[in-house]
Image (cartoon, grey):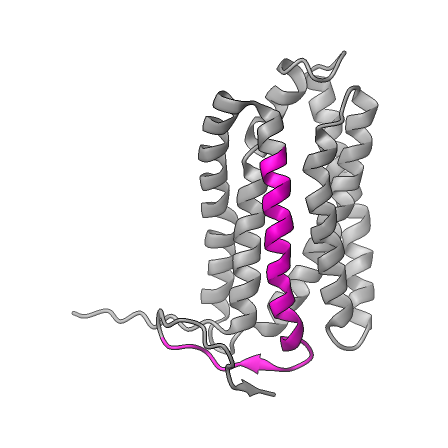
Amino acid sequence: MRIRINITVNRAIQILLAYLFVVVTAESLYAPIFAIFIVESGAISGTSLRTVGFALALYAISKSIIQVPLAHQLDLRRGERDDFWALIAGGIMGVVYPFLLLLVRSSWHLYLIEVFAGAGAAFLMAAYYSLFARHIDKGEDGFEWSLFSVGGLTVSSALGAAVGGVLAELYGFSFLFITSGIINFFVLLLLAGLYPLLDGARPVSLPPFSPIPKNPTTKQ
């Protein structure tokens, strides 16, 4: 019995998947060992495991408070350009965040930065989910959401964690934060390719494993 797998993903989804994969990989360089940085690195005075818990809670609270109403407001507006600029805003905040971690010297610095990071994640994901859902190819919903889950979240997290642990041991946390910020900056430029595909223009799905054409035909 021969099993054929026909992988066709349109240009917009390719860009969104590639962006998420790189961003999550960059964040995962330090996220799994973030508690070690806070408690044992010596960079932040007077911290404990309680500090870690409060910091992560503030991140989650900030993200939750902002993301839901923001997503609702984006849905109320016609077109996708507001979603695009919200995505860019979240991406920029994601660039700034790891560099801010280099400046942390006390618990309250960390708390403020985590609130900022939560807001950035709220802007990024509120817009990302909206754009991803609108550009999914008909009949490929499960497949492309699975690419989002497995490639954009799971594999990227595993890769970042594995590499980050080695780099932290060799070069320290500052190197991880700088590397993550630089990666986030350059991958943000990838989103420029998404702008011409907004508001209905969608590239025809590509044949399996073929390179992306420079000027793909579009359909409305």
Residue 136, above or below 36? below
Q: Which residue is found at the position 65% from the left and 82% from the top?
A: 200
State yes or no: residue 108 in magenta.
Answer: no
Question: In terms of depth relative to the viewer, which is nearer, 216 or 149?
Answer: 216
- In the rendered image, the residue lying farthest to the left is 1
Residue 151, above or below 192? above
Residue 139, x across and y down, in percent: 47, 77
Residue 168, x across and y down, in percent: 52, 25
Report the quarter where the N terminus lies: bottom left
Q: Is residue 106 left or right of residue 41?
A: right
Quadrant of res 58: top right
Residue 158, above or below 46? below
Question: In terms of depth relative to the viewer, which is nearer, 46 or 181?
Answer: 181
Quadrant of res 99: top right
Residue range in magenta is: 178-207
State yes or no: residue 199 in magenta.
Answer: yes
Question: In terms of depth relative to the viewer, which is nearer, 111 or 196?
Answer: 196
Q: Which residue is found at the position 58% from the left and 32% from the top?
A: 176
Secondary structure mostly seen in the magenta stretch: helix
Residue 40, above or below 57? above
Residue 177, x across and y down, in percent: 63, 33
Q: Which residue is found at the position 57% from the left and 54% from the top?
A: 20
Q: Is residue 17 left or right of residue 86?
A: left
Count every numbered label the image shows and give the total.
0
Q: Is residue 208 left or right of residue 133?
A: left
Residue 157, x across and y down, in percent: 50, 42
Report the quarter where the C terminus lies: bottom right
